[in-house]
Image (tube, rainbow, N blue to C red):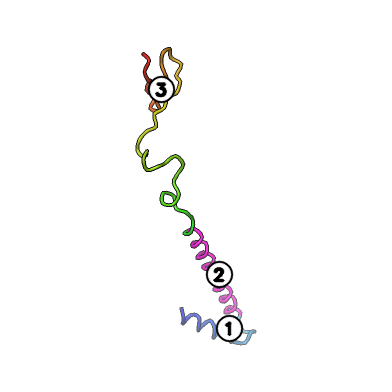
Amino acid sequence: MAAQLTELRSRLMLPADTPEAETASKDAEALGRHWISRTELAAATDRLEQQPQLGQEVFARGASGASEGRAAIRAVPCGRRGCRGRSALGRHVGGW
């Protein structure tokens, strides 16, 4: 990298009316854009790393350590006579 920068600098020191100087200035602009985009990417990476991590600092809605792995069982009315409803798994709950 140091050798490339030294070579670019030496080409930039050529008289402005030579074709090598024109290509050197274009190369220097491209290198500058490349370093700017790398800096912006590093800043975006830092911002993302500072955000809370799901499952570490922030937990998904409804998920807690105590109820993981267990299905929620609640009665949902099914309309059958004497039935108190269906569980979340679709089974009838009591009554007949």
Q: Is residue 36 rendered magenta in the image? A: yes
Q: Which amino acid does label 2 sit on?
A: Ile
Q: Where is residue 49 in the image (x, y as percent from the top left)?
A: 47, 59
- Residue, far left: 69
Distance between the alpha carbons at the discs numbered 3 and 1: 80 Å
Total of numbered circles in the picture? 3
Q: Is residue 93 rendered magenta in the image? A: no
State the residue at coordinates (40%, 42%).
64
Q: Position of residue 96 (x, y in %)?
A: 36, 13
Q: What element carries label 3?
A: loop
- Residue, far front: 66
Residue under numbered circle 1: 12
Q: What element carries label 1?
A: helix
Q: Where are the magenta residues, as a range?
A: 22-48
Task: State the mark number for residue 86.
Answer: 3
Q: Position of residue 89 (x, y in %)?
A: 38, 27
Q: What element carries label 2?
A: helix
Q: Quick check: 49 above or below 20? A: above
> How crowded is the residue under tag 1: few (<14 C-alpha within 10 Å), some, or many (20+)?
some
Viewer-nearest residue: 94 or 37? 94
